[in-house]
Amino acid sequence: MWLVKGILVGLGVFILGSLVYVGYHLRPIEPEKATGLSAITALTLYDYRWWVALVATVALACWYFQKK
């Protein structure tokens, strides 16, 4: 059960962190302008730090719930 809780909590924290990260780096948002999908994927899917953060967040959450 600790594995399921760890994965779900880790993914939840990671998703919230990703939204904050992408929102921060795409500022300032100006009216009448659009942000392309390539900018969002460049900040997330094509960045190795994003994948490292995913693995680290899920691993730390699983470790936390295993110890508890």
Image (cartoon, grey):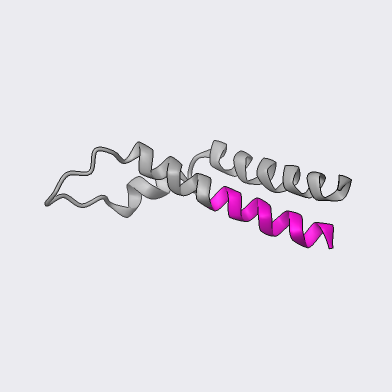
User: Which percent across, then down, holds residue 49?
Assistant: 56, 36
User: Could one spot residue 43 in this view of the protein?
Assistant: no
Picture residue at 53% right of the left edge, 52% below the top: 15
Picture residue at 84% right of the left edge, 63% below the top: 1
Task: Look at the image and give the residue range highlighted in magenta.
Answer: 1-15
User: Which percent across, then down, holds residue 14?
Assistant: 58, 48
Image: 23 above or below 11: above
User: Which percent across, then down, holds residue 45?
Assistant: 49, 48
User: Which percent across, then down, holds residue 64?
Assistant: 79, 44
1 lies left or right of 31: right
Nearest the viewer among 5 and 38 is 5
9 lies left or right of 17: right
Nearest the viewer among 37 and 59 is 59
Q: Tell me the quarter of the picture where residue 8 sits.
A: bottom right
Nearest the viewer among 51 and 23 is 23
Outermost residue to the front: 68
Outermost residue to the right: 67
49 part of magenta stretch: no
Picture residue at 41% right of the left edge, 49% below the top: 41
Taken as a whole, is the magenta stretch helix, strand or loop? helix
Picture residue at 54% right of the left edge, 41% below the top: 50
User: Could one spot residue 33 in this view of the protein?
Assistant: yes
32 lies left or right of 47: left
Labels in figure, total: 0
